[in-house]
Image: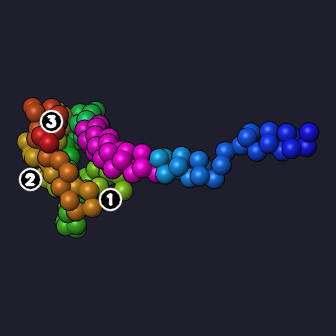
Amino acid sequence: MAARLMAARLKAGYSLMEMLIVLAIMAIAIALVMPRGQAMLDGMTAHAVFFDFQRQMLDLRREAYATQTPTAVKSSDDTDPADVADRVIPLRSQWTYRLERPINVTAGGACTPSAVEVLKAGRTVMHLTMGDNACHFIRQD
């Protein structure tokens, strides 16, 4: 009777070998999925940065129109102290942008055309071009 109880208790659990095999399978699956997941996460972050940049430009346009005050947007790495009145659009940590030329937003809300290069940690991630005279950008890559 005691032998039967002992055998039933041993059969109820998993052996060490079975647990190691399951852990090995999980490790292989994670190793296969992880790079793809990181690339997808980077792509979603870049997309969010693009939409955030677009939204902030439209906010500046609305502000210029509402206050009837022209403004200019300069590159985020431009540190020229003479352009104190120019605006810099804040992006997420490690993200910056470079403008082909400063974007002037008129009191009527129109923008001067410019191309934008968006960078993460100094590496170019995407290029934006202005689609029309309404501060609307189109992602090129």
Within the image, what quadrant is residue 97 found in?
A: bottom left
Disc 3: which residue: 138
The amino acid type, in three-letter code, at marker 2 is Glu
* Label 3: element kind: strand
The answer to whether one can see residue 85 in this image is no
Q: The C terminus appears in which quarter of the rendering?
A: top left
Q: Answer above or below: position of 119 versus 66.
A: below
Residue 94 circle label:
1
Mark 2 or mark 1, which is nearer the start of the sequence?
1
Q: Are marks 1 and 2 in contact (CB under 8 Å)?
A: no
Magenta range is 27-55
- Earlier in the chain: of badge 3 and badge 2, it is 2
First in sequence: mark 3 vs mark 1: 1
Figure quadrant of the N terminus: top right
Q: What's the CA distance linking mark 1 and mark 2? A: 20 Å
Q: Badge 2 local density, few (<14 within 10 Å), some, or many (20+)?
A: some
- Give the class, few, some or many, for how many residues have Cα within 10 Å of label 3's Cα (few <14, many ≥20): some
Q: Which mark is residue 100?
A: 2
Kindly report the distance in space between the C-alpha atoms of the residues bearing marks 3 and 2.
Answer: 15 Å
Q: Residue at x 60, y 49 (%)?
A: 19
Q: Cα distance, mark 3 to mark 1?
A: 22 Å
67 relative to 1 in the view: left or right: left
